[in-house]
Image (cartoon, rainbow, N blue to C red):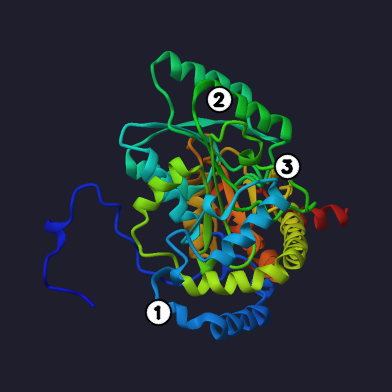
Amino acid sequence: MTSSFDFAPLFPAGLPAPSARWTGLAKYSFVGGNNDSEQVPLDQLIEAANLALRREGRSLATYGLAHGPQGYLPLREFLVTKLKRDAGINCTVDDLLIVSGSLQALDLVNATLLTRGDTVIFEQDSYQGSLTRLARLGVNVVGIPLDKDGMRMDVLATALADLKGRGIRPKYIYTIPTVQNPTGSIMPEGRRAELLRLSAEYGVPIFEDDCYADLVWSGQRPPALYAMSPNGGVIHIGSFSKSIAPALRVGFIVAPWEVMSRMLALKTDAGSGALEQMVLATYCKPHFSTHVPALTKALRTKLDTLMEALNEQFGTAAEFEEPKGGIFLWVKLPDQVDTLKLYQAALAAGVSINPGPEWSTDKSHSSSRLRLCFASPSHQQIREGVAVLAEVCRKEFGVPARSANVEKRAQGSL
């Protein structure tokens, strides 16, 4: 619907740019945090929904199911057990807040701690949703480069000392230590201990985003930073989006009450979706520990397909480190490739990608990088989509000079 009424003069300064109309997913979609639709445990979720509604559906008549503002008690009880088992976190139901996905968790933490002009420390390559929020808030972001083990502590130590020398105390250090987004690295326990030491030395809390931590190929992960912290200076967030389904929009925060009580005062939405919480609690208690290994096994095979397709179509022009879990592959193309331009050309050909500059604090460092989500497309779509992407990249940037499989055929005919 269009309107003849002019709303433009009423918009306040500082609004984000307007959104484009939704036109559907690309034929070959490698974007977003979407998961494998075949791995959604549909029959068991249907069963859980029926059980939950029959058992206590009438409690939907009360905000928060009469379980209080921190969320559905059985779901928090499940999380207490899960976090202890998987991440080494000792917490109680009172330390947990259920939120509408981890994006609401980001908003609540930022609203509690940040004001315009503040400074935060980030991994150089990081989650776009976190970075765009800080840009809107007018917050300064100091990016710390990563290696195969995550955020580099030597550079972090230098940055903290430099900021202190200038009288700046960062509000937090944001990290995705377990299956980092977008690089897929896992920070070893020793480096986590060093991060906690620097956090304590400089009086800067850690904001630990553990959204992908369930999806580790080996099934083994280091203890969470929250679990290792000797002084309670860590805020921990997680989500069911990657382990069960992103459209459910259920995440959680683990935090000391001093911070939790402030976030509760800001969570003025009258509670996150109650039905989703009821269904998840009913489903997860008997099924979560068997579902996740099956999901990660399926995701791992899709990663293999993507890496094979990239090697076949791009040859040595596409460089990447094999991620240790998750749903993303972070790819480096030759320096002359501008992935913001490649994104536009590829989209016109039916392939959607995430250009690197949107996922980095250093646009020049990431200008030839891109993030590919391998969870959502089928194996055939992965192969076909990468072939189309390689052809578009060759036409736009001369990279690869010829697709690798053509070169192989040419060599074979000699």
Q: Residue at x 37, y 42 (%)?
A: 135
Horizontal arrangement in the rendering, residue 237 relative to residue 407 (left or right) = left
Return the residue at label 1.
61
Q: Amino acid at mark 2?
A: Ala
Looking at the picture, how far across and down is residue 138, in whole percent? 32, 38
Q: Tell me the element at label 2.
A: helix
Say if 246 sits above or below 187 in the image: below
Looking at the picture, how far across and down is residue 278, in whole percent? 55, 73
Marks 1,2: beta carbons within 8 A: no
Return the residue at label 3.
222
Q: Is residue 350 visible?
A: no
Q: Amino acid at mark 3?
A: Pro
Q: Tell me the element at label 3.
A: loop
Q: Amino acid at mark 1?
A: Ala
In whole angstroms, how far apart are the C-alphas of marks 1 and 2?
Answer: 45 Å
Along the line of sight, the residue nearer the viewer: 202 or 324: 202
Q: Is residue 202 visible?
A: yes
